[in-house]
Amino acid sequence: MNHRLYQDVEHVHGSVGDVLRLIRTGDTASRSTIARSTGLAPSTVGLRVDTLVELGLVHEVGAEGSRGGRRARRLELDGAAGFVAAADLGANHARIVLSDLAGRTITDTDDTGVSEPLPRADGPAAAVAELWRRFVQLAEDADLPMADFRGAAIGVPAPVAYPSGRIVTPAFEPSWHDAALGALFQEHTDAPVLVENDANLIALAERSDTLPPECSQLVAVKLGTRIGGGVIAGGRLHRGVGGAAGEVSHTSVDGVSAIGCTCGVPNCLESVASGGAIATRLRAAGHDVGTTGDLLRLGAQGDAAVVEELRAAGELIGRVLAGIANFFNPREVVLAGAMSASPPLVAAIRSELYRMCLPLVADDLEVRASRAPRDAGIRGGVVLALDEVLAPARIDELARRGVLAEVG
């Protein structure tokens, strides 16, 4: 089944949902500034704001700086109007964060030490049931009533078809191919649950919050046991027609595959240059390398064979990214994931990327590390969940119904 994403629906300028968007993004702060921004009559703005206040989504606090006359009261999103969940699923972990509607973290399983992976052998339905149980337990532990649960976003290390939310050829669990986790959550909740590729969530977390949205153009690359990518174009996540945009890892490169890949492309970047491929090649050569952590440790110690492998992999990754940069002309290329902490790998990526980019592209290009490499995926999940729960089109529908509890 297809899942309609309200955040992708065009909204009506000056509607109740649009007014909430303006308040949420900080573009406006009072009834008077909203009126000036939208061109709506002050009485109409008053009705829109009153509706948001009645729904419990907005409250008025303090006052703005005076421009003469009576000082206007400042409007703020009421984070206490509900909460969302974000989950980052990996082969060896299942991290969950609960956040209020203002994006403030309420609880994080990384802080409680309960981020153990989900059981996968019994199939996706059983895994979803266990994930829902953890959502409920976390909410209870934080004294949050599940009646206030508004929605969730689930990040997975695999391509995700759009708009169906089906997982496609996941290397972390091949038996989950074609699983629609969001639809499976309908057995447990009516609230929206979105499923997204983890690199796309990293891209969402890394988009600029200082530039106008239309100026945010970036490519985010997750470097770990596998390789993934996400694209932000004009401030919005670009998924492509079917959800495959950003799949940089399945480009054929010079080199020989060291690990298998479900994509079927001969000698794809992931099978040749990912952390898993590097470790496999080194083990075959007699090195004691089990994880990406071992690669980072040995690379930091200056192990010549490991450093050489990291540099060679970085050059291949940089060449692929240069082709993408020349085509897309992004403002930023953001490197995230465990392997982004490897200086030899990152140095080689940067060097090859700038060497192969057109001067016109390279002049405006920043290649940087993630602002929070450990947290980017889960933060992106919170962003995605909130963008859906508070999407103008959804709020407009909610205002017509007038019942916040039916937000799902």
Image: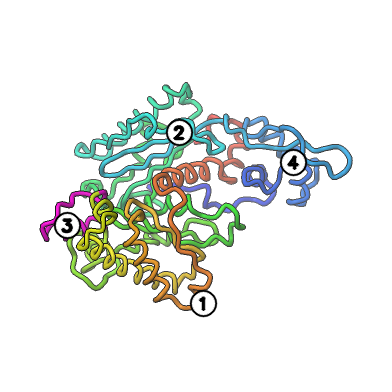
Specify few, some or many for label 4: CA neighbours under 10 Å numbering under 14, 14-19, or 20 or more: many
In the displayed structure, 79 sits above or below 281; it is: above
> Relative to 402, is 255 on the left or the right?
left
- Mark 1 vs mark 4, CA separation in Å: 42 Å
**Earlier residue among tags 3 and 4:** 4
Q: Report which quarter residue 283 is drawn in.
A: bottom left
The answer to if 396 sits in the magenta stretch is: no
Quadrant assignment, res 219: bottom left
Tell me the crowding category of disc 3: few under 14, some 14 to 19, or many 20 or more residues within 10 angstroms, Cα based.
Answer: some
| Separation of marks 3 and 1 at Cα, in angstroms | 38 Å
| Sequence order check, earlier mark of 3 and 1 | 3
**Magenta residues (range):** 275-293
Q: Amino acid at mark 2?
A: Leu
Element on which disc 2 rests: strand
Which numbered tag is attached to residue 360? 1
Identity of the amino acid at label 4?
Answer: Ser
Whether the residues at callouts 3 and 4 have beta carbons within 8 Å, the answer is no
Tell us which disc is closer to us: 3 or 4.
Answer: 3
Name which residue lies at 63% across and 37% down.
Answer: 77
For disc 1, the neighbor class at 10 Å (few under 14, some 14 to 19, many from 20) is: few
Q: Residue 291 colored magenta?
A: yes
Q: Which residue is mark 3?
A: 280
Q: CA distance from mark 4 to mark 2?
A: 29 Å
Q: Amino acid at mark 3?
A: Thr
What mark, if any, has residue 98 been given in the picture?
2
Please tell me which residue is depicted at 45% across the width and 39% down the height of the picture.
192
Marks 3 and 1 in Cβ contact (< 8 Å): no
Mark 4 / mark 2, whichever is N-terminal: 4
Give me the C-alpha separation between circle 2 and circle 3. 37 Å
| Residue 407 image position (x, y, % from top left) | 53, 35
Nearer-the-camera pick, 385 or 39 = 385
